[in-house]
Amino acid sequence: MNLTHLPAAPPAGRIGVVHLGLGAFHRAHQAVYLERYRQRTGDADWGVCSANLRSSVGLVDGLRDAGYRYHVAEYADSETLTLREIGTIEETLFTGKEKVGGRDAEGRWGRDLEALLARLSSPETRIVTLTVTEKGYFLNPASGELLADDPMIAADIDTPTQPRTAPGILVEALARRQAAGLAPFTVLSCDNMPDNGKRTRNAVIQLAERRDAALAAWIEGEVAFPCSMVDRIVPAMTEADFARLAELGVEDPNDVVSESFIQWVIEDDFPQGRPDWEGDGVEMVADVAPFETMKLRMLNGSHSLLAYLGPPAGIETVYDAVSSDDLRALLRRYMLEEAAPTLVMPEGTDLATYADSLLARFANDSLRHRLHQIAMDGSQKLPQRWLQGTLARREAGQAAPCVALGLAAWIRYTVGRDHAGAAYTVDDPLASRFAERHARHGQDPEALVSAFLAMDDVVPPALAADAAFADAVLAAYRSLSEQGLDGALAALARG
């Protein structure tokens, strides 16, 4: 084992960044960049307060008990490892719903909510970052409209000073800053969404308008919402991961495993200042959109193909999937023939080289990135990963057989049973609607495909109305159902 062990720098002393969404990706990405920055510069102004907004309080308290120290194991391959200690997180808070007796319904909300709002209202807080996943913004994934009828958003509208959602927390914190005469913090989304800064701004302003028009106007005029693109593969930890780290003398339930590759591209719009991230490899640019769309459609789009094709056929991880020549060929075809032609990139960008680099990263034998993890929340992800680009292709008269197969695989995946009949959980905000469609149309493939395509909060109506594309999805669905994965891939290759 080629092992490099990097200890954390001393505590920074001041908290300048508040992060919403204390999960594995944040700990293996943004926190790593800030740790690098602090070690390089000794700047004491950019410690991090990280808040978990969901139902898991264990990580919040576990990090607190560990003195806010943990490790990120960065694997280039199974034999090359950098073990990086992270100490840039200086406070962890919990605002989700605590469980009582294992029953979520009896829990209470917002244990540390007031502490979080106070931290957000502090003059020292100049940047707020988010990794709350696509569904955490409570926006219709197709239209971008705030889901005002969602119970969580409805609760924030009714009791805005006791918010439960990320948009609600931002609105209340900004209201407090406005009332105190403080300049607003910059809001930096780090989630995999197109125009993530603009979508965050949209969610916050729409929610603020339901509270106070003057507040909404102040946010619209004064708050910066730069876009960003983040990239690092961070699988969920497994018992095997913990065992590997224990063999190296590191036994901590807060540790994270990731690939060695890391990237962060940020629109440079920080009125209250920011760290000098460029020295640590962050790309500060005027326009993130080309990089963001490239990553969403090529990397994330490829991941989604594997996530819906693989598990019903008994394929558990990305590494297992790309070990198949047929699936590797599918990904390369999708990336170069369907995704890349929809991109407008800066001069000198080599998308074929980028595709090859992604396939190499997917084949990292040290990572076991579970496909069921990637498959979560597909209804929120597929519009930006596949469907918007495919709509542009169809409007130009171009085919999209790989996406048609992927969409068919997603429909097939949402039944919640693999090809052998074993059940699995479909983890998606629209899971009940999927189940209703399968119950009603499960024996009629044409009606089932039509019912899924008619979900206009997922599938753009113009794409659903495209008869040739709908026929391609139906044909792919029949192939998957009748001939399995191998048969569907063979039919795609013949076509």
Image (cartoon, grey):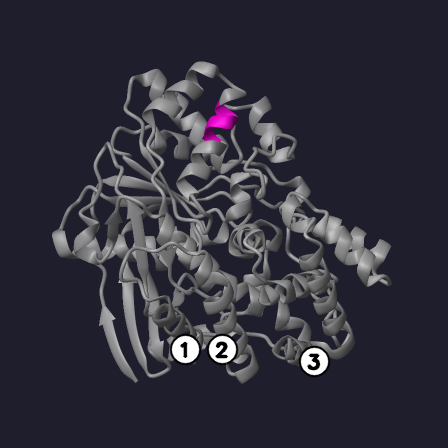
Mark 2 vs 1: CB contact within 8 A = yes
Q: Nearer the viewer, residue 462 or 307?
A: 462
Pointer 3 residue: 487
Residue ID at (42%, 37%): 198
Q: Is residue 292 visible?
A: yes
Asked whether residue 315 is drawn in magenta, I would say no
Mark 3: few, some, or many residues within 10 Å (few <14, many ≥20)?
Answer: some
Say what amino acid the circle numbered 2 marks.
Tyr
Closest to the camera, between mark 2 and mark 3, is 3
Pointer 2 residue: 319
Q: Nearer the viewer, residue 153 or 329?
A: 329
Judged from the image, the secondary structure of the residue bearing numbered disc 3 is helix
Q: Position of residue 419 (x, y in %)?
A: 74, 75
Q: Residue furthest front?
A: 397
Where 230 sits versus 173, above or below? below
Q: Earlier in the sequence, mark 2 or mark 3?
A: 2
Say what amino acid the circle numbered 3 marks.
Gly
The range drawn in magenta is 204-208
Where 370 sits versus 282, above or below? below
| Quarter the C terminus occupies | bottom right
| Quarter the N terminus occupies | bottom left
State the CA–CA distance, disc 2 to disc 3: 21 Å
Judged from the image, the secondary structure of the residue bearing numbered disc 1 is loop
Q: Position of residue 440 (x, y in %)?
A: 86, 54
Where 253 sits versus 213, above or below? below
Residue 364 badge = 1
Q: Position of residue 266 (x, y in %)?
A: 30, 47
Residue ID at (70%, 46%): 455
Q: Is residue 383 left or right of residue 179?
A: right
Q: Position of residue 211 (x, y in %)?
A: 52, 19
Specify the principal SS of the magenta part: helix
